[in-house]
Image: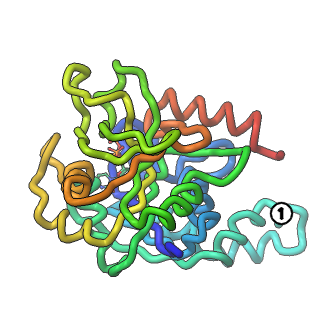
Amino acid sequence: MIDKCLFPVAGYGTRFLPATKSMPKEMLPIVNKPLVQYGVEEAINAGMTNIAFITGRGKRAIADHFDISYELEHQIKGTGKEEYLTEIREVLDQGTFSFTRQREMKGLGHAILTGETLIGDNAFGVVLSDDLCVNQDGDGVMAQMAELYKQFRCSIVAIMEVPMEDVHKYGVIAGESMKDGLYRVDDMVEKPNQEDAPSNLAIIGRYILTPDIFDILRETPPGKGGEIQITDALLVQAKKGCVMAYKFEGKRFDCGSVDGFVEATNYCYENIYNK
Ligand code: UTP
């Protein structure tokens, strides 16, 4: 039912310098596959085959990755090496890919607003591909959220419990528990101090947003860090009606940090690669 998914990939990835000096963070491989491909596969598996990237300067490698490489195809045609392209060919066959640029890095909220022309007036998914999510026991996180959307028809954020000393890295919610792992959000704070955090339920990089978010974002002033924060816009939605927070099934790795990236690499090598 939701067929569009937005991928904000315009950030500088400063925590991965110098690797990200001329290469997008999203193209860093976890074993043999770029981070962004994991995210796109997750979206496509949730039925979101219309993939929209918010890119920036120096991110052309992402557009090239989701296109045919004729020279390469020609070079390895008929050889055993063709099998290495199987997965990405499947992605290309199933998805359509569009791109627009965020000219200034004014925050995730601003990046999402930049995507309005690619999304239009429908609910859509958002994947931050530096959060790698895997669920080997069932549906991917986006598919789980798309299923919930059918029931609630409102914005949904994916959450996980984090240690209190880590809440300052996340948007944090407070809400009324509806049933196991599902909350109706009544408060949200972006990167709070431990003392100000309403809970230890942290938002990770998976969202389903209803399209009224665009009008709200247009009116949202810069918040924490001088950036337009999606958390501030979601709080407006939450106060007006309904934003759900969902404790997803599966594992999430913060691949925007070196520690999370190494953890994800080890996990994927042992559990997913060549399985
Ligand atoms: P991050 O803050 O984690 O990514 O933003 P970053 O800025 O690339 O990384 P560091 O902190 O400098 O190492 C979360 C996501 O939002 C996107 C980023 O690309 C990332 O996927 N983003 C952020 C944008 O697209 N535009 C922005 O203005 C800000």
Residue 26 pos. (x, y %): 48, 52
Amino acid found under the numbered disc labelled 1:
Glu
Q: Is the shortest distance between ligand 1 and the CB of mark 1 under 8 Å?
A: no
Q: How is the image coloured?
A: rainbow
- Closer-to-camera residue (89/73): 89
Asked if residue 204 can be seen in this view, the reply is: no
32 left or right of 158? right
Q: Secondary structure at mark 1?
A: helix
Image height check: is 170 above or below 10? Answer: above
Q: For residue 16, what is the image quadrant?
A: top left
Residue 36 pos. (x, y %): 53, 56
- Closer-to-camera residue (19/221): 221
Residue assigned mark 1: 83
Label 1 packing within 10 angstroms: few (<14), some (14-19), many (20+): few
Residue appearing at x 72%, y 44% in the figure: 136
259 left or right of 221? right
Q: For residue 70, what is the image quadrant?
A: bottom right
- Closer-to-camera residue (247/34): 247
Residue 27 pos. (x, y %): 52, 53
173 left or right of 106? right
- Indicate the quadrant containing the C terminus: top left, top right, bottom left or bottom right: top right
